[in-house]
Image (cartoon, helix red, strand yellow):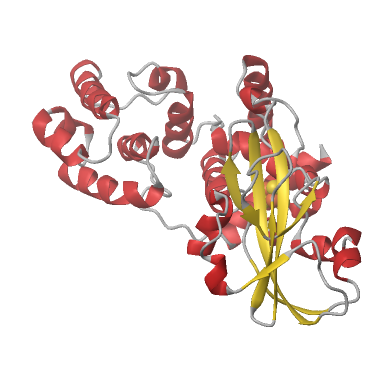
Amino acid sequence: MKNKKFFVENLIKWNRNQNKSEMPWKGEHDPYKVWVSEIILQQTRVQQGLGYYNRFTRAWPDIRSLASAKEQEVYKLWEGLGYYSRCRNLIETAKYINRELGGQFPDKYKDILALKGIGSYTAAAIASFAFNQPYAVVDGNVYRILSRFFGMQLAVNNSKGKKIFAALAEELLDKSNPGIYNQSIMDFGAVICKPALPLCAECQLQKRCVAYQQKMVYRLPLKENKIKMRHRFFNYLVISHGGKVFVNKRTEKDIWQNLFEFILMETDNMLPDEEFLESSKFTDFIRSRNYRIDKISQIFKQKLTHQLIFGRFFHITLKTMQKPLNKYKMVSPKGLATLPFPKFISSYLKD
Ligand code: SF4
């Protein structure tokens, strides 16, 4: 319970003090505009959706204008957004509301949910933003944040998991400010607790986040068909000495056999940078060597058939080399370009 209170308070605090995302639909109370924005954003990145939202609401600022619009013009404006059934449903529902409900957008959650093309997420967003009703939005963002913060090792894509997450989301909802709470969690998932590269270092929830404390951030949320996926955590040391870099040829029966890589230190989890650099794995290897860390990359991810690889690159200059690194080969930057690397590394080198 204490953690739930902490979660809600800090989420709202983050939204109030640090959330900089300024979108035209934020703070919007017109159900029509909330609806249009939610439908556009369903399969579309916010930055791409923004222009469409502005053009759409400029061309048809309310239900009546959309209901009487020339369909071809609506589809034309939708061009490039894809998933045209969303556009078709917007037109049909606008006509229905105009014809059957006197142009008034319904204000009850269950009536909103009954409209064509509106699922529980969109209905909760409209009910809370436009009518301040206590319905929590639950989508992939929410599953991810809740499963990480509360350390819930429960698949989010089966009916049992969905029920449990939905109940928790309802319980956490700030009933006096459902719109603000929903906006906060949506933005928090888009800006801080992101799927691939969450910004844990600057996250206000970090000190009580179970996934962070137990180093499970990259394992959550769980998905049923992904449970059998093996997660691996690669730390590559890109060590240079005298203008050359150490590389290794992968010979074992494992992924990327016969391809080259840098010095690999695989760990059981993706440790924070500092923790990895202090781990015995790293210090035992580097101990007597005089070195400098030049750069640490962000974390990259690659999905293979049965494995999900997370990895990052530590660029290190060895100033002197007391002990030779016999196992590894030294190559010049020119030589590096001729070696076959797995895509995980070659894409990084190309960047
Ligand atoms: S610490 Fe990381 S995983 Fe936990 S809530 Fe914050 S961003 Fe998400």
Quarter containing the N terminus: top right
Apparent side of residue 336 relative to residue 285 in the rendered image (left or right) = left
Q: How many discs mark residues in the rendered view?
A: 0
Q: Where is residue 19 in the image (x, y as percent from the top left)?
A: 54, 58
Relative side of 31 to 140, left or right = left
Which residue lies at the image location 39% right of the left edge and 22% below the top edge?
112
Front in this rendered view, residue 74 or 115:
74
Does any portion of residue 179 appear in the rendered image?
yes
Please state if 119 lies on the left or on the right of 156 as rendered: left
Point out residue 278 in the picture as x, y percentages from the top left corner.
87, 65
Q: Residue 74: horizontal and vertical position, in percent?
A: 15, 35
| Residue 198 in sight | no
Would you place residue 36 above or below residue 240 in this image? above
Quadrant hosting residue 127: top left
Residue 221, percent from left and from top: 66, 35
Identify which residue, 250 or 39, lies in the foreground.
Answer: 250
132 in relation to 245, above or below: above
Q: Look at 38% across and 23% down and name the residue there.
A: 118
Q: Which residue is drawn at 62% across and 18% down?
A: 158
124 sits left or right of 265 in the view: left
Which residue: 42% across, 58% down? 22
